[in-house]
Amino acid sequence: MDDRLDARRMRYFMQVLDSGSVRGAAEVLGMDPSAVSRAIGVLEEECGARLLERRGRGVVPTDAGELLATYVRRQHTQKQQLLAQLDDIQKVERGHIDIVAGEGFVDWLMRHSLQRFMAAHPGITVDLSVGSTDAVVREIVEERAHIGMLFQPPRDERLRSHHSHPEPILTLVLQTHPLAQLGRPLRLADLLPYRGATLHRDFGVRQHIEATEISEGVRLPTQLSTTSFHALGQFVMAGLGYALSARLPMPAAPDGGRMVALPMRNALLSQGRVHVVSRHGRVLPPAAALLLRMILEDFPPASARAAPAVG
């Protein structure tokens, strides 16, 4: 192996990507920006290609830069895996796991797999982050998280799906709402007279809703757009209107009313699926692999499934 791709210079390069600029990376590294810039220049000479290009006030990786970043992340992951396996070949006693999931999965995880896992393995630390569909995919692909749980990820060969099951998008209202009195699956046009809430566009749920709007030739006015499933539930329970979402917990409203989930007529809103994913080709450390198995075992058979709310 030759002496190109010096580890120190690659560390500087990755910090530039994380910080979004040479100056930002220099501040984190405690270095002069010119020294960081020179190191990147040497690295580009070693690679024989430009690694960064300016965009706005910062920099982004070129195609060659993306290849190098993927290589560095994979090397880092392989090193972590080797050390973990050498440190504890047969027992899962120490380690760290990064999980990223839609908000709707958090309560389910903390009541099931993750709660049991942490109780049984107190020496293992866990970072549980909440994000949109796009954010979960990004964290898994860039190997910043071991396990992801999300609604309807895009087709991406870099993702490995360990489990999936259907999860319809429903209209959530109080049981006293006029929509709950119709007694039939709803069209989007049925929602037009009422105020609505939904998730931001980087959520798979919202992307399915927008495809259905195109299909039915309807544009729903949205009073509340949010990244929070909790906010959707509060919007409904306050009697402000409906929320279009995958399944949410159904707590009682302050006045004793109950939230109900109404089915939709358009088949597009029944085609979404919940997925449990990891990075394709990535060998998970023993602790993460054990937790993944526990998560998969907690999903009941399809005939008895009561899925968690999803993000």
Image (cartoon, rainbow, N blue to C red):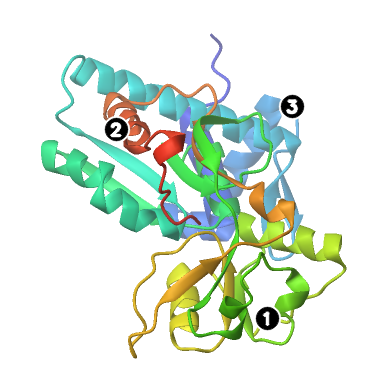
Q: Whole-percent x and y of residue 198?
A: 60, 72
The residue tagged 1 is 222
Mark toward the viewer: 1 or 3: 1
View extreme (front): residue: 183
Query: Sequence-wise, which precedes: disc 2 or disc 3?
Result: 3
Q: In this view of the protein, which residue sits in the foreground, 266 or 118?
A: 266
Q: Amino acid at mark 2?
A: Met
The residue tagged 3 is 48
Query: Sequence-wise, which precedes: disc 1 or disc 3?
Result: 3
Mark toward the viewer: 2 or 3: 2
Q: Whole-percent x and y of residue 95?
A: 23, 34
Q: In this view of the protein, which residue sits in the foreground, 293 or 256?
A: 256
Kindly identify which numbered label has been placed on residue 294: 2
View extreme (top): residue: 1
Q: Whole-percent x and y of residue 43?
A: 62, 33
Q: Is residue 273 visible?
A: yes
Residue drawn at 27 percent across, 18 percent down: 85
